Image: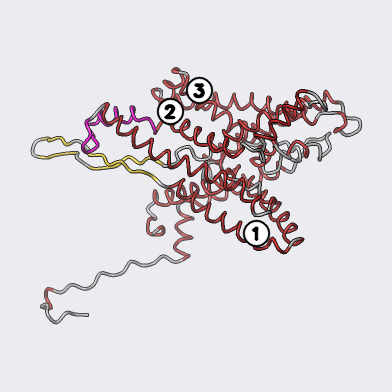
Amino acid sequence: MANPNIPPHLQQPPAAKPAVPNLEDLAFAVKSSGLMDKMLFTLVAIALYRLGVQIPIWGVDSNALQGFLQGGLGGFLDMFSGGALGQLSVLALGIGPYITASIIMQLLTVAIPQLEEMQKEEGEQGRKKISQITRYATIGLGLLQGTLIIRLVGNPANLLPGVDPTFFMVAGVLALTAGAVFALWLSELMTEHGIGNGASLLIFIGILAGMPVYAQKTYTLVSGDPGRSFALLGLLALFVGLIGLIIVLQEATRNVFVVGSKRQVGQKIYGGQNTHIPFKINPAGVMPIIFAYAVLAFPDTILRLVQATPGSLLESIQNIYNQYFGFTGMLYGVVMFVMVVFFTFFYASIAPNMQPRDIADNLKKYGSTIPGVKPGKPTAEKLEDILGKIIWVGAFGLALVTLVTSYAPIAFRIPTLAGLGATSLIILVGVALDTINQVKVHLMARQYQGFLK
């Protein structure tokens, strides 16, 4: 509408509102950007993986692992394999050996100067060499973990009639190792040709595959005791709140303001742009929980493997361990809390993008500074102080999520949801957020920003 107080020749027509894209426009953007092909490839790869989970190793009773999976490291690994370990599938090890090999290589890269130099100074070729070493380590860990599992279930009493124990041992270990290599190969294809990180997506799908089992057990429990219905609602509300906290822990960052240097060329001044360095509150993700759980579960698994006789010293040790450090032990919560905090700081100390001295050296090299802080050592000390404070926040938040998810199902008398712990929730939320972000980046790279506003 024209303004009568402004002359007509000075008035401008109102700017047209940007058109809101409809579903057809969005579908065209997805198809023309190649995103649809990536999504279809990811879905086909997931379907192929889940099909492999249903193929069992011949020769053993399907219930042979149930006693082992009731606790210890076996139940933890079964969660990542999507139930494949529980039925001794050829993909029972899943992506677990590769994840373990990757963690070991990260630790060795910090401890061994040659590997660190290979990663930093040799560029893409160095990273390819480390990836190849990680693949070889995956095969070795597959053989080791496969031998452990087959050793646990290879008792002649658990085998079908007519199956030779020695043949079953050799064939079973080779089948499990081949399944681990197949999972590694498939995850790399998904990362290269699909959407999201292939290894993370396989774990994500494995956890989702266990959801119907949790739901069925919970329904059976609640339907048999209607008084627990309100407890179930309270527990689900608590889990929703924890998901919100996990999103904050995964996405929150502390931005450190940085001023770039200026340089004059002739009559023009270049540089001087202000930017910031983002530091995540929880740089370690779910790794501290995995480390802490593995450390606590490993002694219990070893004691189960030894199979102590009644009244022996080993049985006494196992009873003492379960009394104090088992899932319902007196010191379990305290030890788990301390270990999650410790491993959060430990993982942050070895993360390449969380090294104050390296960051300070790079800032000094390019002439950038933090306002009010001198370059060099003062900058490194300032960054160490900032990182120390934010990591304390992330470590305590992560430890809190771990304890609440461990004890809440017991407190609400809904033990069937105890398997949906902190590790599962953080992986589900983290992988979902990462996949969504990669979809956005993929569309933005092809100039479809309008569809993401």
Marks 3/2 in contact by CB < 8 Å: the verdict is no
Residue for badge 1: 232
Position of 365 with respect to 78 (left or right) is left
Q: Farthest residue to the bottom: give it.
A: 4
Identify the mark at residue 108; answer none if there is no mark: 3
* Of the two numbered discs 2 and 1 in the rendering, the one whose residue sits closer to the viewer: 1
* Of the two numbered discs 1 and 3 in the rendering, the one whose residue sits closer to the viewer: 1
- Expressed as whole percent of the image width and height from the top left, the position of residue 187 reads 58, 38
Q: Farthest residue to the left: give it.
A: 267
Viewer-nearest residue: 319 or 178: 319
| Magenta stretch, residue numbers | 354-374
Question: How many numbered circles does the render carry?
Answer: 3
Image: 195 above or below 77: below
Residue at position x 64%, y 26% from top?
141
Residue at position x 21%, y 73% from top?
13
Position of 119 with respect to 62 (left or right) is left
The amino acid marked with disc number 3 is: Leu
Residue for badge 2: 124
Between the residue at mark 3 and the residue at mark 2, the CA separation in whole angstroms equals: 19 Å
> For the residue carrying disc 2, how many other residues have a C-alpha within 10 Å: few (<14), some (14-19), or many (20+)?
few
The amino acid marked with disc number 2 is: Glu
- Dot 1 lies on which element? helix
- Dot 2 lies on which element? helix
- Expressed as whole percent of the image width and height from the top left, the position of residue 356 reads 34, 30
